[in-house]
Image (cartoon, coloured by chain):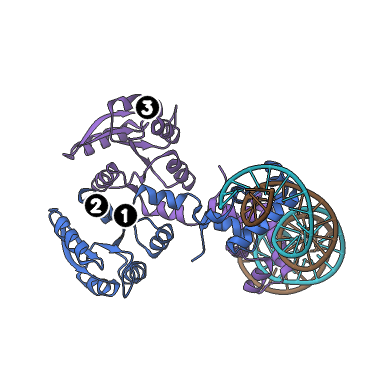
Chain colours: A blue, B purple, C cyan, D brown
Amino acid sequence: MVKLLIVDDDPLVCQSLQLLLGKETDFEVLGVAYNGWEAIEMCGRQPDVILMDIQMPVMDGIESTKKIKQQFPGIQIMMLTTFQDERNIRLALHAGAIGYLLKSSTIENMANQIRAMSSGSTVLSPDVLKAIMEPNREDLQELTEREKDIVELVARGLSNQEISEQLYLSIGSVRNMLTVILDKLELRDRTQLAIYYWQGKQQ
Amino acid sequence: MVKLLIVDDDPLVCQSLQLLLGKETDFEVLGVAYNGWEAIEMCGRQPDVILMDIQMPVMDGIESTKKIKQQFPGIQIMMLTTFQDERNIRLALHAGAIGYLLKSSTIENMANQIRAMSSGSTVLSPDVLKAIMEPNREDLQELTEREKDIVELVARGLSNQEISEQLYLSIGSVRNMLTVILDKLELRDRTQLAIYYWQGKQQ
DNA sequence: GGCAAATAGTTACATTTGTCACAAAACTTC
DNA sequence: GAAGTTTTGTGACAAATGTAACTATTTGCC
């Protein structure tokens, strides 16, 4: 029997999840909470799995995930979200969540995902996995095409000389463009640019 | 009903998985293959999910995952492995696998993981997730403690000046140590080091 | 005690990097 | 065709980076 706690500021979401998941014979919904604070208080009831919304008033999903994981490391937490927000994925997983799913899943899928999670496996939507594995191109949009080319090569560890050869440019141009890129992204040097490319904005 | 294909060069593993998973009422084991080639041939039987060993003769799990995903994108592939090899994780996921699990899982857990996968979710062991998200410390072992400290800070984008302040060293020492680090890891500059730290060796 | 490694330092040098000012094609867009 | 952006370039400069040679403590170990 998997004991569940549902945390979402929208009562409608809570109720429908409670109703639908409650129908599964191997699930028991211990209760619902409408914000992070209430969620922490309700951990006394010893749930196995918490389904947690990310955006909530009072205390958001990531904050409360951190707190819960500190006090109750055995509880598995799955973040629920309406869209995949790349920034939050990393934060949530670092906070200790082991699932990150879109609310659009069918109940049957969700139930299977919860079962897999309850044994400790990490469950993600495929998009979410992609977002973790692939470089962060989202904020590179303010760059021109040519600038993006340069970023790619810097992120592979090439020197200005090598970049100029790859792209058939003079070194001076490469350096000028790099200055513009660093300025646009508010970074200081190529190393920070490479880190940004692969890791995204720090905190 | 989830239709399965089991691929492993060890007949014992194949047989026991076939026997144990076959007991689940919602699973049907379509067959077993002993290498990547056979696996591709057997995809004609239209499995939903393939459980695939990584190390196999003739054609390994990653190669055949790539091929299968090209020809049959709808088939979900879960890699099975006896230990978590950080290098293979990325390769397997890039090849198109959406699960990466240790063979040591119980059959019940494995069944739940397969069910979650069959709906398209990615399922990973928590260690595996950690390996993807956390920096690659494996080959940093040949460095001394102090050198690792420096690597950490370079990988956060700090300048030599800033590193020397953080660690209470002279800039000269930082630069000397960095030279040694780059030499040990066969890298050229701090940017390549940062990339290596976050991304690991480029294939 | 002696040896090896790790830690920390200095000085000097060559190279790379990043910035700035300025400019000229090439390309869109109105 | 005028205006604005993108792309490309030069030259000069300051700062940061990486390397090399050499030294001095400290630490752990046989």
Give the alpha-carbon distance from disc 3 to disc 1, as whole Å.
31 Å
**Position of A4 compared to B181: left or right?**
left
Query: Tag 1: Cα neighbours inside 10 Å, few (<14), some, or many (≥20)?
Result: many
Which kind of residue does numbered mark 1 sit on?
Leu
Image quadrant of residue C16?
A: bottom right
What secondary structure is marked by label 3?
helix
Q: Mark 2 and mark 3 in contact (Cβ < 8 Å)?
A: no
**Position of B7 compared to C6: left or right?**
left
Q: In the rendered structure, the residue with mark 2 lies on which chain?
A: A
Identify the residue position indicated by label 3 in the image. Answer: B40
Identify the residue position indicated by label 2 in the image. Answer: A110
Picture coordinates of residue A64 (x, y %)? Answer: 33, 70
Image quadrant of residue B58?
A: top left
Picture coordinates of residue A110 (x, y %)? Answer: 24, 52
Picture coordinates of residue A137 (x, y %)? Answer: 51, 52
Residue at 36% across, 46% down:
B102
Which kind of residue does numbered mark 3 sit on?
Ile
Identify the residue position indicated by label 1 in the image. Answer: A101
- Asked if residue B156 can be seen in this view, the reply is yes
* B199 versus A29 height, above or below: above
**Pair 3/1: label in front:** 1
Q: Earlier in the sequence, mark 1 or mark 2?
A: 1
Query: Tag 2: Cα neighbours inside 10 Å, few (<14), some, or many (≥20)?
Result: many
What secondary structure is marked by label 1?
strand
Picture coordinates of residue A70 (x, y %)? Answer: 35, 70
On-image quarter of the C terminus of chain B = top right
Image quadrant of residue A8?
A: bottom left
> Do discs 3 and 1 share a chain?
no
Nearest the eye: A83 or A80: A83
Nearest the eye: A20 or A43: A20
